[in-house]
């Protein structure tokens, strides 16, 4: 298993907001993620809906993407409070990935994912994503 990797987004959702189209924020996220073979690539994401008051907060989730692309062993590394961390973990449990590959074969990989809570004024509803 590799050491922790961070999934990165090449474009900020804030930068994408003015260009909103028929595509969903989830699809924008998937399209802008790193696609290196050494990192898991999200192919299906669920954006958690959070209560007001969390705008600007970041929840850091650590988990393993197994060789089949499922997130396992999820835990909150940091969060402003336990309730917010739980909501984000529940959403990330539903994500699906193309697993990382080593020597052409899928491998389990440890991931650290920072999730920044954005304000509803950016999209019309509160959502969490980074």
Image: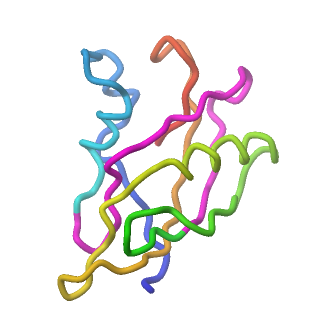
Q: Is residue 73 above or below residue 104?
A: above
Report whether 115 appears left or right of 41: right
User: Quadrant location of the N terminus?
Assistant: bottom left
Q: Nearer the viewer, residue 82 or 97?
A: 97
Residue 59 % position (x, y): 64, 48
Q: Quadrant of residue 5?
A: bottom left
In the displayed structure, 111 sits above or below 60; it is below
Q: Is residue 121 left or right of residue 97?
A: right
Residue 47 is one of the magenta-drawn residues: yes
Which residue: 31% across, 49% down?
Answer: 43
Name the colouring of the figure.
rainbow
Q: Is residue 100 above or below residue 14?
A: below
Q: Residue furthest left?
A: 104
Extent of the magenta region? 36-63
x, y percentage for residue 96?
Answer: 40, 54
For this rendering, which residue is in front, 25 or 46?
Answer: 46
Asked whether 68 or 63 is in front, the reply is 68
What percent of the width, then of the height, locates residue 75? 68, 63
Q: Going 49% across and 67% down the picture, which residue do you hit?
A: 111
Residue drawn at x 56%, y 52% as measured from the top left: 93
112 is higher (above) or lower (below) than 86:
below
Residue at the image position 62 percent from the left and 33 percent from the top: 56
């Amino acid at each position: 298993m590799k050491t922790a990797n961070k999934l990165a987004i090449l474009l900020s959702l804030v930068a994408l907001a003015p260009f909103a189209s028929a595509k969903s924020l989830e699809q924008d996220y998937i399209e802008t993620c790193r696609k290196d073979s050494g990192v898991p690539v999200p192919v299906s994401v669920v954006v958690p809906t959070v209560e007001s008051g969390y705008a600007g907060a970041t929840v850091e989730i650590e988990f393993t993407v197994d060789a089949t692309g499922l997130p396992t062993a999820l835990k909150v590394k940091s969060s402003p409070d336990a309730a917010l961390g739980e909501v984000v973990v529940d959403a990330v449990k539903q994500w699906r990935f193309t697993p990382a590959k080593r020597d052409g074969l899928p491998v389990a990989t440890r991931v650290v994912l920072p999730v920044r809570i954005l304000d509803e004024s950016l999209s019309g509803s509160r959502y969490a994503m980074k």
